[in-house]
Image (tube, rainbow, N blue to C red):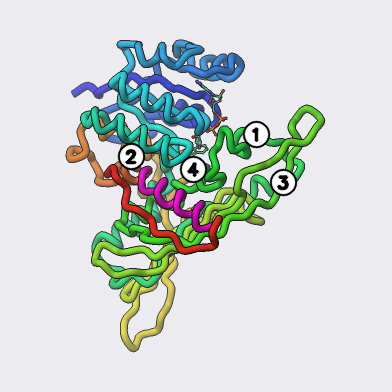
Amino acid sequence: MADRIINFGVIGCGLMGREFASAAARWNHLVGMNVRPRIVAACDTSPKVLGEFCSANPGVRAHADYRELLAATDIEALYIAIPHHLHEEVYVAAINAGKHFLGEKPFGIDLAANRAITAALRARPGLVVRCSSEFPFFPGVQKIAALIRAGDIGRVLEVRCGLLHSSDMDPLKPINWKRMVEFNGAYGCMGDLGMHAVHFPLRMGFAPRDVRALLSKIVGTRPDGKGGQAPCETWDNALLACTAVAPAGEAFPMLLEMKRIAPGHMNTWFIEVYGTSCSARFSTRSPRTLEVLRYERGKPQAWQVQDLGYESAYPAITGAIFEFGFADAIQQMWSAYCDEVANGTRGMRQPFFCATPGEAAASHELFDAALRSNAASSVEPVRAPSFM
Ligand SMILES: NC(=O)c1ccc[n+]([C@@H]2O[C@H](COP(=O)([O-])OP(=O)(O)OC[C@H]3O[C@@H](n4cnc5c(N)ncnc54)[C@H](O)[C@@H]3O)[C@@H](O)[C@H]2O)c1
């Protein structure tokens, strides 16, 4: 049977727009897919960025206004990867235009914007709208998901998850939109990195009930690229200590970290799950390494270190002994998204679907509570999201 082809438009052809184009262009990397994405049109307000994108991806139509993509009858789905202050306007317009889309996090610059997006979604339940989050597709994380789902962990004692950068260590790095409240939002690093820290715990059913937040502003000004200095207003680092509840009902501490200034870390995503029967740890810093400790009474408590290969959720041509990396995680996420659009959530080849608008809404409730907690040095309850 011929592959089902999903015609895509890309809105925002920057760092992440280009990653999708690369993942789509090497779809021959995957084995046994019955669906493939085809990027037919792209939109960026920067003529330079748009021109470079279309040169690198021949045959893609160029548009300066995203509304032209929403009106195009040959476009079934969109990838939307634009600054946070535009999420509400463009996501709501895409929903109202009846387009499926994978939208970048945080899915709205703040809680109000996120609620406007989910309100629009309520009226269009048939659309496959998902939020980008690629790290759970690393093979080590998929293996930890399998341990948790099998009940191997026992009672959950503690969970830690985070994303650590050192990209802002250099105080002379010029400012960009991700350091400006107007474009990135008051969440700062939580809006920028937070969904990466919360998606996997949420998917495992680890729901934060309250939060004590420690937010740090470290670099006060940055070069503005025009010879002067600009205020750098956003939170650089966030440490969220939550009381979380596991599906079985037990409460446990959950520590979430999202840092733009974490010495020595290029882009480290990590998960650590500690339980009474079994504990497991994974970090993209050592992407081949999965650590598991199984507790047996009277036996030595020893971490087993497993060397992982390319055991992806969606099979690929890469030999099982080779390494898996960031671009592979992006392609696996896109496989899950296209699989879900083509085959429905129940018909997917593997069960791990992309982050949902409900999970994005839960992240907003947490970050909003974290802002209040940091301002008042208080413990703030985290509301359950009104959209699941
Ligand atoms: N999933 C991830 O790992 C990851 C990594 C980085 C960024 N992101 C997210 O991706 C989104 C974009 O970030 P980025 O790093 O690609 O930023 P970027 O600045 O590299 O690209 C954004 C692009 O959007 C364009 N743009 C701005 N306004 C537009 C409009 N009205 N219409 C069309 N294009 C417009 C800009 O010209 C720019 O080229 C953000 O939501 C960010 O949080 C996700």
Q: Is residue 149 magenta?
A: no
Disc 3 and disc 1: Cα gap in Å?
14 Å
At horizontal 20% and vertical 32% (from top left) the residue drawn is: 343
Whole-angstrom CA distance, mark 2 to mark 3, is 33 Å
Q: Which residue is mark 1?
A: 176
The residues colored magenta run 361-374
Label 1 near ligand 1 (CB < 8 Å): yes
Image location of residue 268, percent across then percent down: 54, 52
Which amino acid, mark 3? Gly
What is the CA distance from the residue labelled 1 to the residue labelled 4? 23 Å
User: Pointer 3 and pointer 1: residues touching (CB < 8 Å)?
Assistant: no
Q: Which residue is mark 2?
A: 357
The answer to which of 300 and 44 lies nearer the viewer is 44
- Amino acid of disc 2: Pro
Which residue was labeled with disc 3? 220
**How far apart in space, not on screen, are marks 2 and 4 (Cα)?**
23 Å
Residue type, numbered disc 4: Phe
Circle 2 or circle 4, nearest the eye: 2
Q: Nearer the viewer, residue 161 or 94?
A: 94
